Amino acid sequence: MGGCAPLETRMTIDERPGKLDTLGLASLILGLVTFMTVWCCIGYPVGIVAIVLGAVALSRNRSDGYSATSRILAFSGIGISIGAIMLHVVLMAIGQVAKPDLPVSRVDEVSVAPPAPAAPPSAPAPAAPQAAPAPVVEAPLTESCADLAGRFGTSSKLSDLQKEELWKQYADRTFAWKLRVTEVSSDFLGGFTVQYKCAPKSSSFIQDIQIKYPETRKSFVMQLEKDSVYNVQGRLRMSSTLLGMTADDLP
């Protein structure tokens, strides 16, 4: 009566601050883990879990009391996971497109034996046998795995253009290196992929080089043990600052 009564402040459901959905936050965290581990075998399962958790978080609406921030976290987790998996698929597909091996042949000059003495017309002299062409032996690279990893890896001071030009000297060249196994996995495009680091030590995070093996080499691949060092032969195909070098098995 003697004064104005204080106005009652009421908040509608939309105006109340919503709570944070832990599933959306977990989806974002697992999405980041997927981006960092998609290059090895655990990346795909982690990415699938991140996508599922994000989808569950998105199915909840604000009427359940969750904030809009939760939806943003869920969207981010799903987007990062799908993007990382698609990027890995594209890069692996590019690695499978190897340059065609051009047949290398060399015809040696064959010396012709002097003509045989004249024989009677009824018994012509047999033709002299020709020598078989000598096989071409390709010498492997003299540079070590560590040398090339330093020139083309993340610690290199060369620009991408300089790396592209320099790699022309090494593409399709064979090598025989001592390498340490970091992971062995099946390739979804067929065959197997083995990730190696330069032995005896390497500064790379995951790998220095990965080598593709066909299905016919399964018995060899099954014998490889992680953190063990092997004498490995292969043929270089391509190089990436992020993925390192890619090579094919040398039959």
Image: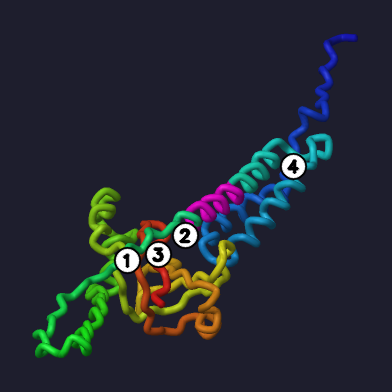
Please tell me in which quadrant of the rendered image residue 115 appears: bottom left
Separation of disc 1 and disc 4 at Cα? 56 Å
Percent from the top left, x then y, of residue 100?
38, 60
Q: Where does label 3 land, which residue?
A: 246
Residue 91 part of the magenta segment: yes
Q: Give the residue displayed 52% in from the left and 58% down from the top.
A: 36
Separation of disc 3 and disc 1 at Cα? 21 Å
Of the two numbered discs 3 and 4 in the rendering, the one whose residue sits closer to the viewer: 3
Mark toward the start of the polypeptide (1 vs 4): 4
Q: Is residue 176 above or below residue 211?
A: below
Mark toward the start of the polypeptide (2 vs 1): 2
Q: Give the residue displayed 9% in from the left and 90% down from the top.
A: 117
Q: Amino acid at mark 1?
A: Pro
- The local crowd at label 1, few if under 14, some if 14 to 19, many if 20 or more residues have their Cα within 10 Å, is few
Q: Where does label 1 land, which residue?
A: 103
Q: Where does label 2 land, which residue?
A: 96
Percent from the top left, x then y, of residue 242?
41, 57
Separation of disc 2 and disc 4 at Cα? 37 Å
Q: Is residue 135 left or right of residue 62?
A: left
Q: Where does label 4 land, which residue?
A: 58
> Most extreme residue toward the top, as rendered?
2
Magenta part of the chain: 80-92
Q: Amino acid at mark 4?
A: Leu
Q: Which mark is residue 11?
A: none
Residue 114 part of the magenta segment: no
Q: Amino acid at mark 3?
A: Thr
Mark toward the start of the polypeptide (2 vs 4): 4
Mark toward the start of the polypeptide (3 vs 2): 2
